[in-house]
Image: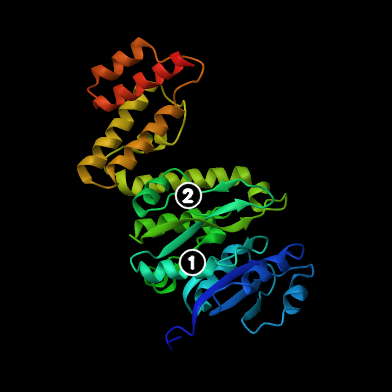
Amino acid sequence: MSIKYPYTVSVLMPAYNAAEYIGEAIDSILEQTFKNFEFLIIDDGSTDSTADIIEQFNDTRIKLIRNEGNKGLIYSLNYGLDIAQGKYIARMDADDIAFNTRLEKQVEFLENNPDISILGTAFVFMGTSYEIHHPNYNDEIRIKLLDDVVFAHPTVMMRRDVINLNNIRYNADYTYIEDYRFWVEAAIKNVKMANLEEVLLQYRQHPNQVTSQRAQEQLETKQRIKLEYLSHYFGENLTSDELISVNRCFDIDLPSKILILDKLSKTNRRLNLFYKKCFDQYIDIIIYRNVPRDRFISLGELLRVIRNNVSLRFINVLLKINIKKLLR
C-alpha cells in the first residue's frame, strides 16, 4: 500500500465485556479473503476476560488498544476513527460474525465507485434465515433516513479521507443511536452512500445488547434526529408544529395531516430536495400510518381534503386505501 495508506482497510471493533462472543468475531475478520488490513480492537475497560481472549490471537494485524476505564462506545468509535491508517474504515461489532468475503467485496465496490463513501451490506440474523436488506442507492437512502436507519452499523465501510474532510464523528448527544445521527450528518454534507444487496454479516441478538436495554431512550433520540433532518431541508417552508406532526401518528385529524404532507410534497417538488418518486412513496407510507385499520376514510374527510386544493395524488391514495379495505 502507499505511504499515505499503510493499509487498505482499518477494521474498527470496540469491545466491552464481550468475552462470550468476541473470539468468533475476531476469527471472522482474520479469516477474510482480503488480507491487507489492520484490526483495531478497542477494549473499553472490560472487567471480564475480553482482553485476555484478544491477546491469545497471534496475528500482527491485531492492534489492541485499552481505554483507561469505561469511556463508552462513542469515545471508542471516535478514537478509532482518529487513529485508523487505512484508506477505508470497516466497522465491526464484538458479537457478530462477518462472512469471509465481506472486506473483499466492499473494497472492490468502493474502488469501482469512487463517488460512494459509505457502504453497507445486507445481513442475516444469526441462527435464522431472516435477512434485512436496506435501500441500495443514495437517492433512496437519503429519503429513508427521514424515517429510519439505513445501515446495519457493523456492516459499514467508509472512506477515511471523506469522513475526515467533512469532520463527521459520532456525537455523544445521541447516545444509543449514534450511528443514525452519523448517517444523517453524512447525508446533510452530501456524502454519497450505498448498500450491497448481498448478505455479508451474521447479526447476533441477545438480551445484553443496548438495543434491548435502552429501547425507550433510543426511540426518543431517534425522533429527535428525524425532526432535525427534516428541519434541515424543510424548516424554512413548514412551521415547527407541522414538522413535528410529520413523524407522529394520529396526533391530528387526517385531513389536517394530509394538508401538511401536501405542503411537504409541493416544497420538495419546487426545491428538488429529494428524488420525487421515492419521496412520494415516503409520503404515502405516512398516510397509511395515519389511517385507522378499523374504519374507512369518511366522505366528510375526503371532501375536506378536496376543498383544500391538495394534489390529486393524495385523493387517489385515500381512495385506494378505502378500496383495499372493501376488498378485505
Q: Amino acid at mark 1?
A: Lys
Task: Identify the residue at horizontal 37%, vertical 45% (top origin).
Answer: 230
Residue most toward the left? 270
Task: Identify the residue at horizontal 35%, vertical 15% (top origin).
Answer: 301
In front: 170, or 85?
85
Residue most toward the top? 299
In front: 268, or 229?
268
Task: Identify the residue at horizontal 79%, vertical 67% (top origin).
Answer: 48
Measured as percent of width and height from the top left, residue 23 is found at 73, 68
Query: Could you say which quadrant of the image residue 307 lies in?
Result: top left
Query: Could you say which quadrant of the image residue 254 lies in?
Result: top left
In front: 32, or 323?
32
Residue that label 1 marks: 105
Measured as percent of width and height from the top left, residue 193 is found at 39, 59
Label ID, residue 134: 2
Measured as percent of width and height from the top left, residue 133 is found at 50, 49
Secondary structure under badge 2?
A: loop
Describe residue 156's horizontal placement relative to residue 269 as left or right. Answer: right
- Label 1 close to label 2 by CB (< 8 Å): no
Sequence-wise first label, 1 or 2: 1
Q: Amino acid at mark 2?
A: His
Secondary structure under badge 1?
A: helix
Task: Identify the residue at horizontal 40%, vertical 15% (top origin).
Answer: 297
Q: Is residue 47 above or below residue 188?
A: below
Q: Is residue 171 above or below residue 220?
A: below
